[in-house]
């Protein structure tokens, strides 16, 4: 067995390991948030295009 497997980390090593785990979770959460935000922004952009097309069609009908 390795020394790390026999005893739990203590002191500075435990602190660094905990900090690294938190950093990994933060990175994963940040990436997931960025992905959700990108999807939401893409949907909003598509809706804006659809709305612009509807407005164009409505404006044409009013001028006829």
Image (cartoon, rainbow, N blue to C red):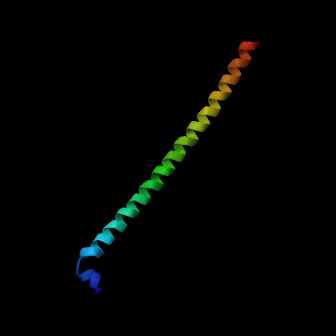
Q: Is residue 9 above or below residue 25?
A: below
Describe residue 55's horizontal placement relative to residue 31 as left or right: right
- Closest to the observer, 53 or 12: 12
Please identify the quadrant where the C terminus is shown: top right
The residue sitting at 33% across, 71% down in the picture is 16
Q: Position of residue 15 (x, y in %)?
A: 29, 70
Work out which quarter of the rendered image holds the N terminus and state it.
bottom left
Q: Position of residue 52 (x, y in %)?
A: 66, 28
- Comparing 18 with 51, the one in front is 18
Residue 27, picture quadrant: bottom left
Q: Is residue 14 above or below residue 43?
A: below
Residue at horizontal 71 percent and vertical 13 percent from the top: 62
Quadrant of residue 30 within the rendered picture = bottom left
Identify the image quadrant of residue 47. top right
- Expressed as whole percent of the image width and height from the top left, the position of residue 23 reads 39, 63
Q: Residue furthest right?
A: 64
- Of all residues shown, which one is farthest toward the front? 12
x and y percentages locating residue 6 in the rendered image: 23, 82
Q: Number of marks in the image?
A: 0
Q: Image check: 59 left or right of 29?
A: right
Which residue is at a point 40% across and 58% down the rendered structure image?
26
Classify 53 as above or below 38: above
| Of residues 18 and 42, the one drawn nearer to the viewer in this rendering | 18
Return the residue found at the far bottom.
Answer: 1
Q: At 66% from the left edge and 23% from the top edge, which residue is drawn?
A: 55
């Amino acid at each position: 067995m390795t020394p790390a497997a026999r005893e739990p980390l203590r002191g500075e090593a435990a602190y660094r390991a905990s900090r690294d785990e938190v950093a990994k979770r933060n990175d994963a959460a940040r990436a997931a948030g960025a992905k959700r935000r990108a999807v939401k922004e893409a949907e909003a952009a598509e809706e804006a295009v659809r709305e612009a097309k509807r407005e164009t069609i409505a404006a044409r009908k009013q001028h006829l």
